[in-house]
Image (cartoon, rainbow, N blue to C red):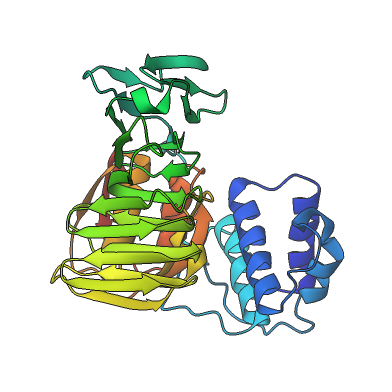
Amino acid sequence: MDNKIAGELIDKYFQGRCSAEETAIIETWYNRIAEEQKLSGLPDLQQRHAQIKYLLPKDPAAGKTRAVFKIGYRIAVAASLIIAFFAVFFFYRSGGGLQDFSKVNIPPGTNKSILTLADGRKISLTDVSKGNVASQTGVNITKTAEGTLIYQLTGDANDLPSAINRVETPVGGQQIILLPDGSKVYLNAASSLTFSSGLGKEAERRLELSGEAYFEVAKDKAHPFIVSSGKHEVRVLGTHFNISCYAGEIIKTTLLEGAVKIHAAADIAVLKPGQQSVFTESQDLKIHEADLDEAVAWKNGYFRFNEEKIRDVMKKIARWYNIDVQYSGDLTNEGFTGTISRYTNISDVLKMLQGTKAVHFEVEGRRVTVMP
């Protein structure tokens, strides 16, 4: 492909005519290039038309068209990145020998969750319109037009009882929660968060998490913020971090801002921004540098995979699209790397994965069979 073709797609983006797939390709490519070439001081993406075109390779190497989900693929230089990211568009439009998914209509997940109050009442937040959701002693619970659940303290803090609330998202659901202490939580699919309705007025701000959540913690040195997941515990004062702790999977804590202390079985570690802790099934705690974009991609509306095995890729897809995944045959053990919007039909995601020629899919209803 050449600069003319890539330039036409960029023009289409700025004219507002790109599909969700095309938009994800352009924005992901540009954000990576901007970071690698230290362009953080530039204005936002809508004002970067000239800079984007300037970054196009002057003489791109000719070669076979490839999909963005490339087995074992690593981005080395800007030229290879733009070729790989834009090539996927033309691969699909030219047929590429892919199975026809035109009749597959499985939409992405949406904002939906269940709120369980201290008295056992369950409220489907999907079915509740904006405004008042419930009231408990000393706190009002409301929902915004965008679906955010808001806890607001109203009574005398000294009179607040210990009322435990729980917010649970199903497969294919997500929920944003503004906690009583002002902290903000993004709860991913198939997850649950348990906390006190008087959070912030007790000695500790203690929560229990199952699944995955991104936290923006309100600073309060007098009241430590503690997130527990079984034998794994994260203690913070004020910070931004992500925890993934789905049942049967390793626990990952990724720090973006501030500092957190990890208590995992007999181990204790302090994370610095940009680091990730991994608590394995053998109860070992390991610390390494994190891919921050990958860790919070779900919160920002994307799937991002970095040399992940197909079964791990499909776990994330299954949780979001509410599908049943089955496997057939001797599947590849190679890793998949790529980025795509979480808000596109599942057919687009399957096309990109199948474009690697490493896996193929059969879809029947909500059952997806993965084959070599």
In which quadrant is the C terminus drawn?
bottom left
Q: Position of residue 368 (x, y in %)?
A: 28, 47
Q: Position of residue 366 (x, y in %)?
A: 29, 38
Residue at (60, 47) in percent of width and height: 20
Quadrant in the picture for residue 41: bottom right
* Residue projecting furthest to the front: 158
The answer to whether residue 310 of the structure is visible from this angle is no
Quadrant in the picture for residue 92: bottom right
Q: Position of residue 156 (x, y in %)?
A: 43, 23
Residue 7 versus residue 127 in the image, above or below: below
Residue 84 versus residue 355 in the image, above or below: below
Residue at (39, 15) in percent of width and height: 135
237 or 296, nearer to the observer: 237
The answer to whether residue 339 of the structure is visible from this angle is yes
192 or 107, nearer to the observer: 192
Specify whether 40 is left or right of 115: right
Residue 135 versus residue 323 in the image, above or below: above
Specify whether 138 is left or right of 161: right
Residue at (38, 44) in percent of width and height: 188
* Residue projecting furthest to the left: 282
Q: How many marks are shown on the rendered structure? A: 0
Q: Position of residue 75 (x, y in %)?
A: 55, 79
Residue at (60, 67) in percent of width and height: 85
97 or 197, nearer to the observer: 197
Residue 230 versus residue 120 in the image, above or below: below
In which quadrant is the N terminus drawn?
bottom right
292 or 268, nearer to the observer: 268
